[in-house]
């Protein structure tokens, strides 16, 4: 009976995802948002239709789906793309991370939140939702300078965010125990980059030989699962490992005509499951329980993105029509923020309830409202700077 329920649930999820995709085409809403809403409806916060065992699927599915996304984002970090948009990518990503941290730290401290807790929440707020933003870009079909720059920013901003988060943890540690958080973060990031190079370099040379110009589907699956599995085993970031491997393959695999076609073809089932289960696991009660602090965090993060995105865009010398679009386009927030929250809660048990509840609660808002705003920014960029 358990197997029957499992198969019925998986079949229903796929058909629900297909319906959500079709609804997105009709309503012009991102399918990410539709899938998340559908997940909330069938999950514990809604009708409770999804079997409890579904929560056990989420972690492995999310790892595979996000590793695929990381590969595709890394593929945008080619020499050509960086030479065209590198200044904007680095300027905006650094401005967004620094601005978000400082803005939320100062703002929450001013309204009475403990400055230490406010600093941690500011660092956690730096993360974006790479899967959501990548899916919105793919669904929109828009490929211009703005979409390429956004992809590049999302590929590296979590790297800066992890660094800032580790420094904030170190600053708040007492009795000189600051070495652990910093060395741990550097080990995670450095190990992931090294793993990405060790997987990506041979993959760039060896794949795409059996079928000239394009890796086979089994090659693509093998590389993704190998990268994800090794990253988990080595306790490194599978997002950074996947991004690094994708960038290496895109830059070194010169015999590839379509290096990532097969990943694009096989990622959709994993993405459907990922977003629907993410919606099912969103806790709406947490949003209510946090009250005015959650509201303040949401408002401050939005203002921080708008201000720092514009500052970074001006330093990055993007086209004038795009300057105001980068901040709102980078509002979605998801899994990386929750991961940071769990680490912070474990490090500072006295704040554990506030940190986890707040991040989970505000993730509901940014995951539901962020993707439509990202899509609107993409469409506006296509209208105003079609050749950028």
Image (spheres, rainbow, N blue to C red):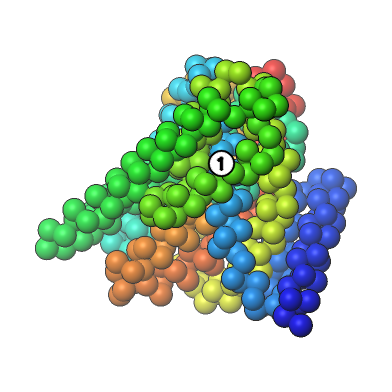
Quadrant occupied by the C terminus: top right
Residue beneath disc 1: 223
266 with respect to 180 (left or right): right
Query: Can you see residue 247?
Result: no
> Quarter of the image holding residue 208?
top right
User: Crowdedness of circle 1 by 10 Å Cα count: few (<14), some, many (20+)?
Assistant: many
Q: Secondary structure at mark 1?
A: helix
Given the current orientation, which residue lies at the most extreme front position? Answer: 210
How far from the left and from the top, in percent, is residue 292? Answer: 49, 69
How far from the left and from the top, in percent, is residue 220? Answer: 63, 39
Query: Can you see residue 213?
Result: yes
How far from the left and from the top, in percent, is residue 130? Answer: 56, 45
61 with respect to 234 (left or right): right
How far from the left and from the top, in percent, is residue 275? Answer: 67, 57
The residue shown at (54%, 74%) is 286
The residue shown at (73%, 58%) is 35
Quadrant occupied by the N terminus: bottom right
Given the current orientation, which residue lies at the most extreme left position? Answer: 175
């Amino acid at each position: 009976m358990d197997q029957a329920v499992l198969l019925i649930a998986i079949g229903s999820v796929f058909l629900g995802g297909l319906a959500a995709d079709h609804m997105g085409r009709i309503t012009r809403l991102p399918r990410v948002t539709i899938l998340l809403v559908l997940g909330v409806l069938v999950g514990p916060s809604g009708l409770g239709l999804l079997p409890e065992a579904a929560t056990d699927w989420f972690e492995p599915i999310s790892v595979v789906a996000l590793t695929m996304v990381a590969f595709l984002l890394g593929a945008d970090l080619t020499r050509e793309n960086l030479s065209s948009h590198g200044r904007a990518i680095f300027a905006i990503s650094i401005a967004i991370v620094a601005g978000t941290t400082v803005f939320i730290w100062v703002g929450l401290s001013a309204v009475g939140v403990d400055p230490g807790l406010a600093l941690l929440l500011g660092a956690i707020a730096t993360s974006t939702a790479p899967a959501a933003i990548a899916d919105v870009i793919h669904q929109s079909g828009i490929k211009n300078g703005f979409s390429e720059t956004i992809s590049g920013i999302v590929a590296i901003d979590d790297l800066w965010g992890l660094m800032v988060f580790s420094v904030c943890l170190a600053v708040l540690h007492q009795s000189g125990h600051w070495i652990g958080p910093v060395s741990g973060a550097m080990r995670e990031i450095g190990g992931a980059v090294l793993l990405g190079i060790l997987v990506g370099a041979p993959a760039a040379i060896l794949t795409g030989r059996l079928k000239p110009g394009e890796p086979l589907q089994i090659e693509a699956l093998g590389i993704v699962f190998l990268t994800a599995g090794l990253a988990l085993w080595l306790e490194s970031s599978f997002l950074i490992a996947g991004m690094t491997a994708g960038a290496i393959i895109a830059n070194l695999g010169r015999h590839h005509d379509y290096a990532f076609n097969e990943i694009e073809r096989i990622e959709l089932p994993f993405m459907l499951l990922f977003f629907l289960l993410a919606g099912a696991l969103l806790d709406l009660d947490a949003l209510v329980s946090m009250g005015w602090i959650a509201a303040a965090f949401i408002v401050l993060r939005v203002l921080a993105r708008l201000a720092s995105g514009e500052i970074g865009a001006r330093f990055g010398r993007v086209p004038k029509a795009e300057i105001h679009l980068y901040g709102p386009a980078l509002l979605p927030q998801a899994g990386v923020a929750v991961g940071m929250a769990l680490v912070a809660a474990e490090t500072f048990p006295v704040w554990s309830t506030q940190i986890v509840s707040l991040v989970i609660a505000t993730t509901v808002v940014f995951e539901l409202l962020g993707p439509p705003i990202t899509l609107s920014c993409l469409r506006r960029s296509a209208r105003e700077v079609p050749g950028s």
